[in-house]
Amino acid sequence: MDCSSPISVPSPKIRWVIFLTLALLALVVRLPQLGERPMHTDESINGYIIGQLLAGKEFHYDPQDRHGPALAAFTLPLVKLEGAKNFSELTESQLRVSTVLAGTATVLLFGAAVEMFGFVACVIAALLFAFAPLSVYYNRYFIHESLFVLATFGLIISGWQAMQRKSIWLAGLAGACAALMLACKETAPLHFFALALAALAVRFWSVRMRLRFNSGTVRTDNGLLPAHPKLLKMIMAALAIFLFITVLLFTWFGQNWQVFADLFHAVGNFTARAGGEGHEKPWWYYLKLLCDGQSGGIILILSLLGMVSVTSQVLGRPKLQPLAPRIFLVVYALAIFATYSAIPYKTPWLALNFWLPIALLAGIAIEWIWFVTTKCWVRSVVLILLLGLGYLMQQDTRLRVFIKPADEKNPYAYAHTIEDVLDLPKRIETVAQQNNLTQPRIAVIATDAWPLPWYLRKFSQVGFWQPEQDPGAADFYITTSDVSPPLAERLKSFRPDFYGVRPNVLLILWTPEIKRN
């Protein structure tokens, strides 16, 4: 039997219903048990920043070990809507909702990318982004990556559409997305470079096509066009919006104009951090991470097949349209993957930046495989295999995201907070009640106390000291295993309880003797 009838692209109204449904399903998958996984150190730091903002303080960009203000600006109104009034009232779920919404919006954006990459490719990509373990896991992580990927996708779509439609307002939107990227993370220039390289590749290909098919048999209006009378206005609009939003966010809406000196220092700090700073990994680290689980390797192979399909069309006469955006996607994917792989500093959540092009390229591969043959039995086999892939992906997501989200063997749970630390504040509350301590004084003595500021946020008298400092008298002490002799003498009347904080990181809670009535 022949199944040669083409897949018709639905009308815009039906298309948006489809992608809105996928986005809502992605939201449903990301919301359950949102507050159960312990807060990673980076999440707790970001939560502390939100607590400071709730207290009326300004956002101060720290070039040493923090990122930009975009996540805080996006999250602050959300937690206020959720009823949080101060740091002690914040919850894990309230904070993580912001990145869940960013991931959900990314799924919805695939609907806006249909004109670039095709309907079938975007539907498959939306499904992969909505339900794959890597994207689901880090969309539930209160860090900058989810918002950064959303802004990156917005820049790709709006920038491309601005060039196609010669639209000044779309160029301005592209500038806004670029500013949001920079206000998320200092890695934005790496993506700007990769995107510029991809645009140049498409430009080069378009020129070659015009020279090769001078008769006009091949259309070039799906590539980056030559100079247009509006081009200068578009560039100026994009640049103006980019500068305006960048200044607005980094100065925290005009309240901190000293931030530009910090931004200058951030260049050196970012360069130093790229060297590793304890997070050095081999170049193949991300390949291994992406191949994790039962479905990861299959999806990665599909994305490579997507690259092959695009390359085969570049070398021959184009058949599947649109081709130019797909060339753009391949070059961007290769450039950004090569850049991150070459940098010694590597953490698993950075792989979320690859998942966007990987999902699209896997969608392109499935579309290509589908149209290679018109035999119904072959297409039936393809559908069965895709259902099998969906089942494996669901199993991976269930295990990595919901069953063992903080397990040391989970490759996504990098230097993650151990569940053991959740019992520490409960122990303090119990002993404080038994000793009639309504406002216990807690002294934390450790070189790196995070994420304890988050877990001790409900106690009103908590202080943090370095090991060489004297904390003075306190009702409870929290220390590392190596305490100074004067402090060790003071702790003789306290009882030690041991708590794992991160893999190979142990803290000791020193509790007073329980008073007997």
Image (tube, rainbow, N blue to C red):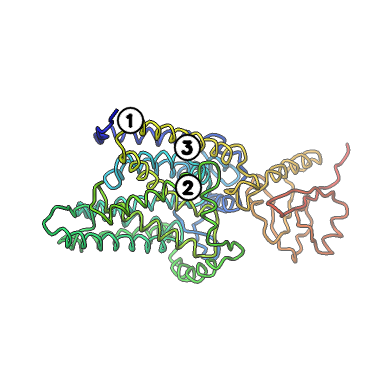
Picture coordinates of residue 14, whole percent (x, y): 28, 32
Q: Outermost residue, left direction?
A: 215
- Residue carrying label 2: 76
Q: Residues within 10 Å of mark 2 (few under 14, many from 20)?
A: some
Determine whether, in the image, residue 290 is placed left or right of residue 279.
left
Residue 262 in the image, given as x and y percentages of width and height: 48, 68
Front of the two marks 1 and 2: 1
Label 1: few (<14), some (14–19) or many (≥20) C-alpha neighbours in 10 Å: few
Identify the image quadrant of residue 206.
bottom left
> Along the horizontal axis of the image, is 19 left or right of 276?
left
Mark carried by residue 389: 3
Quarter of the figure with the N terminus: top left
- Percent across and percent down for residue 123 are 35, 38
Name the residue type under label 2.
Leu
Name the N-terminal-most of marks 3 and 1: 1
- Crowd around label 3: few <14 · some 14–19 · many ≥20 (10 Å): some
- Cα distance between the residues tagged 1 and 2: 53 Å
